Image (tube, rainbow, N blue to C red):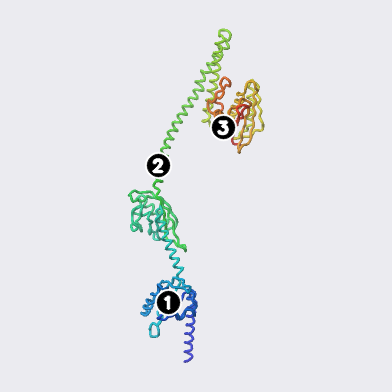
Amino acid sequence: MPTHFSQIENSLLEALARLAAVVESSDDAIISKSLDGIILSWNNGARRIFGYAPEEIIGKSILVLIPPELQHEEPAIISRLKKGERIEHYETVRLTKEGLPINISLTVSPIKDRNGKVIGASKIARDITEDKKRQEALRESEVRFRTMADSAPILIWESGVDKLCNYFNQTWLNFVGRTMEQELGTGWTDGLHPEDSDRYRQLYTTSLDAHIPFEMEYRLRHRTGEYRWILVKGTPRFGPNGTFQGYIGACVDITESVQAKQTLANSRKDLEQLVSERTASLQEAITQMEEFSYSVSHDLRAPLRAMQGYASVLLDDYRGKVLDSEAEEYLQRIVTAGARMDRLTRDVLVYSKIPRSKLHLQRIALDTIVSGIAQQYLQIKSKGVDISVEVPLLPVMGNESFLIQAISNLVDNAVKFTLPEKTPQVRIWTEPNQGQVRLWVEDNGIGIKPEHQKRIWRMFEKIHPQTKFEGTGIGLAIVRKTIEKMNGTMGVVSDGVTGSKFWIQLPGS
């Protein structure tokens, strides 16, 4: 019999020891007190939370932990305990040893004797100060979000995992002229344009099921009753653990932009129609110009050559016989004017054909072209001409016929605008320039003053008297047109006294 009681006693002692260990190892404060508020026990959790060692606090009133303004709570708690009630998760404020307030959650249970009489209380206090701070920060964040959202110039909404909208900012409500209660859930869809409703619902549902962002344009009824175009961007929301929590969306009124695009599209359509009409008109004008060019080339030049021919025959057959000196002078003037008119007509035809010419660019060896031009020029000129070519010349990308036309005109100008008492000297060379090739044609002629150097590239621009230096005023215009057609540039360097240096520049090969 004693052995049996000894075993029971040992079991009870072991259970009490385990219970004591649990109490001492708990992070929560576990305190017992009498009904008159005297602290009877104090675990390590209480020491950690409040800062008192057991020997400092046991035997003292529980009121040392309660702020003066909250000490009315203790009688109310004792009153409920005496009735046998249990108080759970009661949030309040208590003081540490240093007098600092902390937020705690109290669970208070009555302690009863063998007869069921309440003789004290057991308190479990959990420090929830950090939780309170986090909750307060969350509330402040929520307030900030609502404030920012309501003051934002864009329409903002939120929806949950149930696909129902649970928030609209004030800007949205002002836009649609409805209350939050009217818009919540699916109420807002009443404002969707009938033609956009199904399209929006399908995109929204599909995106939400896949938890992916979406974007679209749709029409929403404004408080004025008109439908306005809205650009919406929906973004999925996820919790700290990655769980899907719904969507947040931002909408912008893009009505003016959509209308501007439509206006632009209409304008583009009108412009395309106008361009088509103008192109047809231009094509007709080009056709007429080509017909006119043909007429100039054949119909107008034919009688011109006949006039020249008859005047020359009269001079040859009747010089010194029937014609006196005055008549011979008149006939000579007819021949000279006819020849000049023929050259002018020919140059105009050349100039007019350049824009319509089909252009094929290829690698051109300038050595061959320039040498050929120099040899041909020296053969047909009666007066002495000194043409020097500094070989090798760098190759370029261009069109052979255009290059021959341009370089020939530059050489012709170099010889033409030289004073009679001088032997024309022409120097030709090339040099690399900014990844391209520049060809120079230098002369010892009369030069071109700087104030005239821009004019000389235009049609019929002549800066010297016709009686002194004959020309049509089209040669350099032809040079400009052909070089630009080959994606090149041209220019001149001259002081207006000691000759000129003309240059053309084309891509190298």
Q: Which mark is residue 483?
A: 3
Amino acid type indicated by mark 1: Leu
Q: What residue occupies the far top of the structure in this picture? A: 321
Q: Which mark is residue 263?
A: 2
Return the x and y of residue 85 as percentages of the image width and height: 37, 78
Q: What residue occupies the far front of the structure in this picture? A: 68
Label 1 CA crowd tier, 10 Å (few <14, some 14–19, many 20+)? some
Residue 478 visible in the shown view: no
Q: Residue at x 57, y 19 (%)?
A: 467
Lower position in the chain sequence, tag 2 or tag 1: 1
Q: Quadrant of residue 375?
A: top right
Q: Which mark is residue 63?
A: 1
* Cα–Cα span, label 3 and label 2: 41 Å
Return the x and y of residue 365 as percentages of the image width and height: 63, 33
Q: Is residue 118 left or right of residue 445?
A: left
Amino acid type indicated by mark 2: Thr
Q: Quadrant of residue 267?
A: top left
